[in-house]
Image: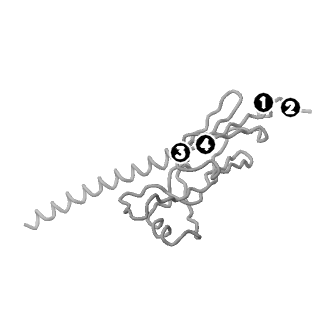
Amino acid sequence: MLDSLKEAGKNIGRELNRAWESLSEGWRELLSRSSNALTPFVRNKNEELTESQALAAFPRWSLLAGEVEETGRDVVVRVEVPGMEKEDCRITIEGNVLYVTGEKHFRRETHDSTYHLMERAYGSFQRAIPLPRNVNIDQAEANYKNGVLTVRLPKEDGGKAKSVPVS
């Protein structure tokens, strides 16, 4: 009887170890692929009490998936920010880093309902995206359509190679 309990304990230990390894691998994959897309959201302390209570159950982190594409003339940055108005997004460029900041507001359609699934984060956020080249900030253009913020940044000519004679 004792031997069968020991064997059962070993089997349970192996299965738990296998499950832990699988979970760890999933987290490593998520973090490596999401790069800096995993973004913290900070809640506004001035919200109404009923909304604050509801927001306590919402996630504090969310993925703001993005991509940086370089063409012959531009660097194009796209960031998914669904559920927001374009007025709630701000773009700042410092050096070779583009910052997308904003606030995603919680809006409840009805007040007599119960949430059963809450995966969307709400509040203020900032996402920093490194740029691969120097860009001309003065000619930057941004638009927001279908939940995707697109920023087109013309590359500066100064990025070309230049020989410097040695005296």
Q: Label 3: which residue?
A: 65
Q: Residue at x 39, y 64 (%)?
A: 112
Which of these two is toward me, 23 or 152? Answer: 152
Q: Nearer the viewer, residue 167 or 1?
A: 1
Above or below for 130 versus 167: below
Residue at the image position 24 percent from the left and 55 percent from the top:
15
Q: Which mark is residue 149?
A: 4
Secondary structure beneath dot 4 equals: strand
Q: Which residue is mark 1?
A: 161
Tell me the kind of residue under disc 3.
Ala
Cα–Cα gap, marks 1 and 4: 32 Å
Distance between the alpha carbons at the discs numbered 1 and 2: 10 Å
Mark 1 or mark 4: which comes first in sequence? 4
Relative placement, left or right, of 152 versus 29 is right
- Quadrant of residue 152 in the image? top right
Amino acid at the residue labelled 4: Leu
Q: Reading the chain from its start, which is encountered first: label 3 or label 1? A: 3
Q: Which residue is mark 2?
A: 164
How dense is the environment of label 1, judged by Cα within 10 Å: few (below 14), some, or many (20 and up)? few
